[in-house]
Image (cartoon, grey):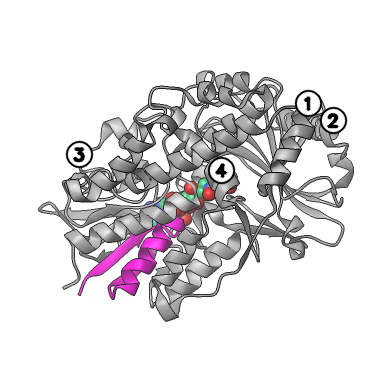
């Protein structure tokens, strides 16, 4: 009987636990917090409910695939497709709705920017081709197993990639590649996709141009009961499968004997025997704290972290009719914002402000006529609270200037998370949202592998390892990790 200890009940840990238990393994999921969900936990203040982390739900097939692995044990999960991904507001008064319908999108490009939509649509088609060509190679398998590079498993992927070489700009930066859209504001819009893995569009490779296809081509979605509904479905499914979920259980040490894991030790000293250990916690504290007596993968652990954020959760007694579920109020100088974040480790003087109002699609999350605002600005990993009051004031002023809504007048409650708070709550190294940044040309190869090469029975899942951060990639990491487990530590 294979006994698996999974550390951390975020998306990576939960999804790996589900797949391992569905296969028939005995799984114990150990979570240091009082609740499961990791970054995707929720908070209730009076009649307002807030999702603390992710707000954007894409590629829902991956969640369905995870639940499907549990067969009859899968908990129900319902979601709807949205007719637009985001409302964008520029300081010069330009307002743009990113419709998912192609004809409506074309008309909106013409009316908002006064340009021929052709180059933008071509850019999106190229994003789709790039995504289709690379996902099998870079996202759906391990990059670190010899078998991934055997001709019959890889040549098909490579063949596709080579055929679409025009859509795979290997040597360009994302910002320069996006110039093709023919308008600086639309270029800025496409540059923002680098932030979907916490990177800098002026340094990140143009390969990241495949990300917009997720939104524009595949669509954006809203879980019926808010983003936390994703955690509820995974949690219930794991329970249905008999996963032993233990909250308030911090793992202090991964025990290794003669090159193989044999269990984990909890804070307080309890030892839990296991022949497979999966860390769904951030890889940096996993090595620095839980594997401190083992050789450290220094190059990976010292990689530049992705961005973090400062998030204001505001209960707002205002219907905000012009705001959608997702809204962006742009910085005047986007390049300066990233110079501040990555070169000076500061929040820009004029940061881009993201406003998410979950109650626009889940009305029960706020009182009638009110909204549960999640207001986020990009912050460097490790930023502390110094300057928080100034930042709040800047954000309030920007919202009033660009939307006409007086935040102070309508705000009924507030909660704030900074990068340091995110680190304290989830163990994420320096509060980075997506593990290491993807600013280097070969970043995809520089994330930690899903199976440890030197320690038998040790695996990694979640946003700090391959294939990357964000809900879809964390779900993929759960799938890849389980596939590796099936191969290298088969159920006997
Ligand atoms: C503010 C914010 C906004 C985001 N927006 C989006 C978005 O819109 N869309 C999107 O797709 N993604 C978004 N993300 C990223 C996404 O949330 C993460 O990539 C994903 O949730 C990470 O999941 P995970 O399983 O890797 O780790 P986590 O969610 O961090 O879970 C790790 C878990 O491990 C536990 N743990 C750590 N150490 C130990 C230990 N020693 N013992 C036991 N347990 C331990 C932690 O308590 C935690 O529960 C956002 C993240 C944040 C914070």
Closer to the camera in the image, 435 or 418: 435
Q: CA distance from mark 2 to mark 4?
A: 29 Å
The image position of residue 240, as x and y in percent, is: 44, 78
- Asked if marks 1 and 2 touch (Cβ < 8 Å), the reply is yes
Mark 3 closeness class: few <14, some 14–19, many ≥20 residues within 10 Å: few
- Asked if marks 2 and 4 touch (Cβ < 8 Å), the reply is no
Residue 34, above or below 205: below
Q: Label 4 belongs to which residue?
A: 421
Horizontally, is 400 left or right of 374 in the view? right
In the image, which disc is placed on residue 91?
Answer: 1
In the image, which disc is placed on residue 401?
Answer: 2
The N terminus sits in image quarter: bottom left
Part of the protein shown in magenta: 1-29
The image position of residue 219, as x and y in percent, is: 59, 52
Q: Nearer the viewer, mark 4 or mark 1?
A: 1
**Lower sequence index among marks 1 and 2:** 1
Q: Quadrant of residue 388?
A: top right
In the image, which disc is placed on residue 295?
Answer: 3
Q: Quadrant of residue 300?
A: top left
Q: Nearer the viewer, mark 3 or mark 2?
A: 2
């Amino acid at each position: 009987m294979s006994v698996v200890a999974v550390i951390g009940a975020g998306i990576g840990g939960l999804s790996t636990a589900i797949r391992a238990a569905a296969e028939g393994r005995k799984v114990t999921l150990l979570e240091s917090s009082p609740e499961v969900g990791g970054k995707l936990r929720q908070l209730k203040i009076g009649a307002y409910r807030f999702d603390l982390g992710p707000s954007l739900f894409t590629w829902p097939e991956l969640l369905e695939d995870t639940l499907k692995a549990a067969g009859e044990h899968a908990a129900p999960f319902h979601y709807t497709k949205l007719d637009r991904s985001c409302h964008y507001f520029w300081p010069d008064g330009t307002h743009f709705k990113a419709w998912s319908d192609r004809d409506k999108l074309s008309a909106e490009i013409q009316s908002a920017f006064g340009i021929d939509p052709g180059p933008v649509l071509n850019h999106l088609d190229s994003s789709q081709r790039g995504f289709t060509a690379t996902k099998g190679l870079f996202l759906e398998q391990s990059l670190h197993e010899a078998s991934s590079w055997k001709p019959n498993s890889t040549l098909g992927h490579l063949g596709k990639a080579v055929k679409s070489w025009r859509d795979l700009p290997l040597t360009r930066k994302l910002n320069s590649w996006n110039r093709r859209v023919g308008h600086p504001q639309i270029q800025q819009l496409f540059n923002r996709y680098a932030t979907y893995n916490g990177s800098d569009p002026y340094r990140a490779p143009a390969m990241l141009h495949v990300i917009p296809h997720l939104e524009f081509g595949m669509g954006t979605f809203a879980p019926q009961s808010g983003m936390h509904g994703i955690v509820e479905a995974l949690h219930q499914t794991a329970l249905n499968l008999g996963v032993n979920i233990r909250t308030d259980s911090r793992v202090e040490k991964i025990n290794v004997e003669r090159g193989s894991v044999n269990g984990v030790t909890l804070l307080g000293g309890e030892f839990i025997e296991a022949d497979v250990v999966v860390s769904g916690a951030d890889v940096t504290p996993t090595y620095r704290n839980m594997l401190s007596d083992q050789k450290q993968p220094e190059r990976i652990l010292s990689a530049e972290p992705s961005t973090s954020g400062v998030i204001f959760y505001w209960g707002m007694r205002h219907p905000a009719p012009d705001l959608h579920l997702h809204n962006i109020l742009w910085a005047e100088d986007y390049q300066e914002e990233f110079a501040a974040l990555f070169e000076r480790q500061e929040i820009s003087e004029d940061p881009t402000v993201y406003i998410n109002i979950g109650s626009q699609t889940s009305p029960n999350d706020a009182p009638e006529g009110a909204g549960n605002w999640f207001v986020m600005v990009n912050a460097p990993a490790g930023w502390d609270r110094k300057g928080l009051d100034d930042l709040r004031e800047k954000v309030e002023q920007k919202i009033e200037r660009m939307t006409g809504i007086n935040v102070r007048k309508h705000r009924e409650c507030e909660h704030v998370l900074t990068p340091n708070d995110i680190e304290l709550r989830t163990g994420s190294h320096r509060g980075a949202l997506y593990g290491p940044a993807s600013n280097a040309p070969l970043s995809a190869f520089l994330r930690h592998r899903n199976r440890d090469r030197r320690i038998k029975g040790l695996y990694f899942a979640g946003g700090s390892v391959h294939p990357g951060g964000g809900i879809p990639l964390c779900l993929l990491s759960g799938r890849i990790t389980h596939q590796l487990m099936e191969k290298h530590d088969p159920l006997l």
